[in-house]
Amino acid sequence: MRLFLAVVCSVAVASAALGQVFYSNFGGLANPNAIGLSTGAVTNSGVNAPAGFEWSECPNNNPNEANTVAGFSGFKNSTLDFRLADDFTILPGQQFTIDAVRVYAYRTNAPAAEQPFSGGTLRIWDGVPGASGSNIIYGDTTTNVLFNVQNTNLYRIFNTVAPPPGTAPGTARLVREAYLFVNNITLGPGTYFLDWQLEMLVGTNTSFAPPISIPGVRGLPSWNAGQWVGAPTNAWQAAIDTGNPATAPDYAQDFPFLLEGSWVPEPASLLLLGLAGLLIRRR
């Protein structure tokens, strides 16, 4: 967002309304509602999505190689424990106030009317989760902060053309949008990592988080999502797509998420903008 202030004004002028989506891990501040999962209403193989829906197709970057991971485990059930993490950066002169985080997951073959999750937890780190020097600055792994789940209009599918003959599309993986409450935390410039988990309503069920999907792009150098694998591993690891076929190169992945709340220039920046406005008025 570009700010052109010619007169002294309140913080509210430069911020989004509280509770609105203001940031996307795919679209940033400029395109905050862009989730980064839709690949369109027609598959690479030419199959139309059901009316009102779009596909989220695992991408390929050549005719013979594609991503192989439809979704990463980021759930807790009666026996398994996984978490997911990804980062966002607040630039100098900016300040984020976060009310909620929206994350995405599907349960294979779940009916559209089913509520698959009983809870969710969220933490925020000031560095890479689990790395030396990184600290948890918000949240924990026990407090349930899930307050809403709704269906998207996206079906997650494997690549339909690569490697040949591709995988036929289907509607078994309806992507859900889960809302995690955040108690108005305000953050200044820096790089932060969200770390989240969804708990399954039925103890033996599983769910998976689809990574950002850009047609023709299997991964980008800046992508750096992580996954916590519980016992007996109990460690963080990079979220990597190893590719299909197995000889395809590995690519790091990123997860889609949206931030709700507001963002503003920091107070010092606002003061400078206000003084500049006064000078403009006095010319």
Image: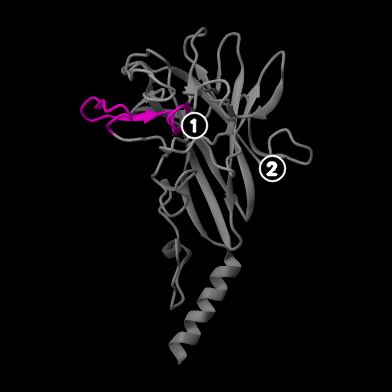
Residue that carries the numbered disc 2 in the rendered image: 127
Graded by Cα atoms within 10 Å as few (under 14), some (14 to 19) or many (20 or more), the crowding at tag 1 reads many
Disc 1 and disc 2: Cα gap in Å?
21 Å
Q: Residues within 10 Å of mark 2 (few under 14, many from 20)?
A: some
Image label count: 2
Q: Amino acid at mark 2?
A: Gly
- Over which residues does the magenta segment extend? 41-65
Say which residue appears at 56% left-offset and 75% top-offset: 272
Residue at horizontal 47%, vertical 50%?
Answer: 28
Describe the element under mark 1 as helix, strand or loop. Answer: loop
Residues at badges 1 and 2 in contact (C-beta under 8 Å)? no
Rendered location of residue 253, percent (x, y): 55, 34
199 vs 12, left or right, is right
Identify residue for label 1. 211
Q: Dot 2: what SS?
A: loop
Question: Does the magenta run of residues contain 46?
Answer: yes
Q: Amino acid at mark 1?
A: Pro
Q: Is residue 101 in the magenta section?
A: no
Sequence-earlier tag: 1 or 2: 2
**Front-most of 162 and 111?**
162
